[in-house]
Image (tube, rainbow, N blue to C red):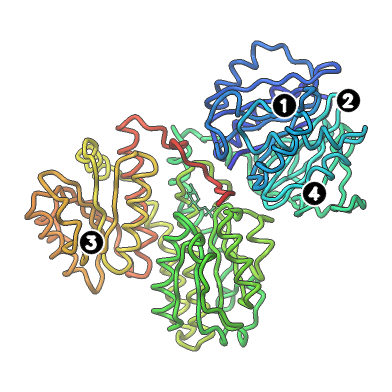
Amino acid sequence: MCGIVGYTGSAPVAPLLIEGLKRLEYRGYDSAGIAVQEGDQLQVVHRKGKVATLAHTVDHFDFKGTCGIGHTRWATHGKPSEANAHPHTSCDGRIAVVHNGIIENFADLREELQSEGHTFSSETDTEVVAHLVERAYNGNLVEALREAAAQLVGAYGLAVTCANEPGVIAVTRKDSPIIVGKSENGAYVASDVIAMIDATRDVVVLGDGEMAKLTADAVEYFDAEGNPLSPKITHIDWDLDAAEKGGYSDFMMKEIHEQPRVIRDTLAGRLVDGALKIDELDMSAEELNLVDRVYVIACGTSYHAGLIAKNLIEGWARIPCEVETASEFRYRNPIITPTTLCVAVSQSGETADTLAAIRDAKVKGAQVFGITNVVGSPVARESDGVIYTKANKEIAVASTKSFLGQVVSLTLLAMLLAQVKGRMRMNQIRMLFRELADTAGQVEAILADTYSVDKAAEACVNAHSALFIGRGMGSAISKEGALKLKEISYLHAESYPAGEMKHGPIALLDEGFPVIAIATQSPIYDKVVSNLQEARARGALIVAVATEGDEEIQQHADHVIYIPKVRDAFSPITATVPLQLLARRIAILRGCDVDQPRNLAKSVTVE
Ligand code: G6P
């Protein structure tokens, strides 16, 4: 949540900051601002609203400076407003700070600083940092930031600049990402590499407590005690195209269409000589064989990928598997032993609750695997092994292609566990792998014809609420379908196991109430059809996602969205796609911004 960016070099900084902030907007978009070193002063501009509003204002300032910092905000402390937008400044206006994270002890610090005469102009937690740096400043910005950071409790990625030190930006972090890069034209800092990828692909992912001093010609790195550090360079191999819409009207549509590639890339190189190969897990077959309990820990869409994994891990490997939202897992006392495997699923790899949960699980002795989309992210670094979903950068706030990458990765993990437990023979693995790979082409076929999805969307657009139902895999898929719809269309949507409808939600149904049913071929198909009939008898408008060739379903549904036939285990990969398209279409028809829905942010780095 919140994106920070900074540049010092030979080029005018304002356009670079604005471009960087636009790319970071997925992290928050309720207000934005920049601070630019102009002559021997700092000039600060903030605006409430999206970066485009800030950009419009900045156009009227004829900034000449070549060093500055910027921020796009997702409000935590203090409502979205101009006063609360970053950068925040010291009393004398000579120090400016941008921050991603939460300062938990800000109230005490604020009181202490106020008692010493510091005056505050915002309600944010961040402003204390500007005043702490001011108090500590003695001609060396890096030292002052080190002293300030030592007093902070919480999570922070911080970039600071000072009018007394032309061309200098000091940065540090704890539990919030900071990426530093250097090109011929200068040095860059950002919350995400996407803000600098057209300048450099070789970046440094700053570690917790580490610091950097950026100047136009060099970047110096230090540990928390101020000792020089040799940074580890990470090479970024995805393309800038990921940050462009590539001819689609929105990022969400582009990312939905990338899913066949994600499936292929996630599977590439995983079947070697007929056996599954996931070397990154860093555990021998013998160690894996000892695993007797699996927890999948995740939030949001990633949690839904976990629900699918539970069906596969228990069904194929016969290992008990629990799926928990990280925010609950971290505050209970789960049963963890050295033979417990915790699988953390996180697109961003920086979700605060997921990170806290795996730290706790490790302390309790579990093995931790991460499934993430971001190389070098905290989840990747803090896990014993990691599988990268090959989704590339996902920009739309509502997750689509990452979800499919997660489902494919978790399917591989379930197959691997079944293989080491001796519950799946090599020829079965090969057959399943082939079928899994075929889903890429099947998703392509779904994307090629969206007529029935569009028609169903038109039928649902004026509803006030929608119910998503399914059984087994269909139940997990329906949860993701409902989440997509509410996230981007603001239409209330609820998901229920179809068999539970009679225990409550059926009371909601009246004439035209949309019920979206996952009715693909499965051993419990007939039961789903019975539940559909019950809903239809109460006047509900039925949209069924069904398997090609199923003529019978037409008698029970107002709209049928056909998808290719796959085995039930792989139905989440195919059946989720029309639900993504349906949610997007309804949102567009309702005039919503599908890429940046209100109140949400892509990375939730606070509790
Ligand atoms: C936010 C995003 C969701 C995402 C969830 C978990 O709510 O808007 O799209 O599923 O966080 O994020 P993670 O990065 O841990 O998968």
**Looking at the image, is 505 positioned above or below residue 70?**
below
Q: Which secondary structure, mark 1? A: loop
Pointer 4 local density, CA inside 10 Å: few below 14, some 14–19, many at least 20: few
**Looking at the image, is 305 positioned above or below residue 41?**
below
Q: Amino acid at mark 3?
A: Ala
Residue occupying the point 45% across, 60% down: 303
Q: Amino acid at mark 4?
A: Ala
Q: Nearer the viewer, mark 1 or mark 4?
A: 1
| Marker count (numbered) | 4
Question: Of residues 322 and 7, which is closer to you in this image?
Answer: 322
Q: CA distance from mark 4 to mark 2?
A: 22 Å
The disc, 1 or 2, on the residue closer to the chain's N-terminal end is 1
Q: Amino acid at mark 2?
A: Asn
Q: Residue lying furthest left in this view? A: 537
Q: Which mark is residue 174?
A: none
Q: Amino acid at mark 1?
A: Thr
Residue linked to disc 3? 519
Residue linked to disc 4? 150
Residue linked to disc 1? 119
The disc, 1 or 3, on the residue closer to the chain's N-terminal end is 1
Q: CA distance from mark 3 to mark 2?
A: 66 Å
Residue occupying the point 19% across, 47% down: 514
Q: CA distance from mark 1 to mark 3?
A: 62 Å
Residue linked to disc 2? 164
Q: CA distance from mark 1 to mark 4?
A: 22 Å
Q: Nearer the viewer, mark 4 or mark 2?
A: 4
Question: Of residues 514 and 417, which is closer to you in this image?
Answer: 514
Pointer 2 local density, CA inside 10 Å: few below 14, some 14–19, many at least 20: some
The disc, 4 or 2, on the residue closer to the chain's N-terminal end is 4
**In the visual, does 520 lie left or right of 354?**
left
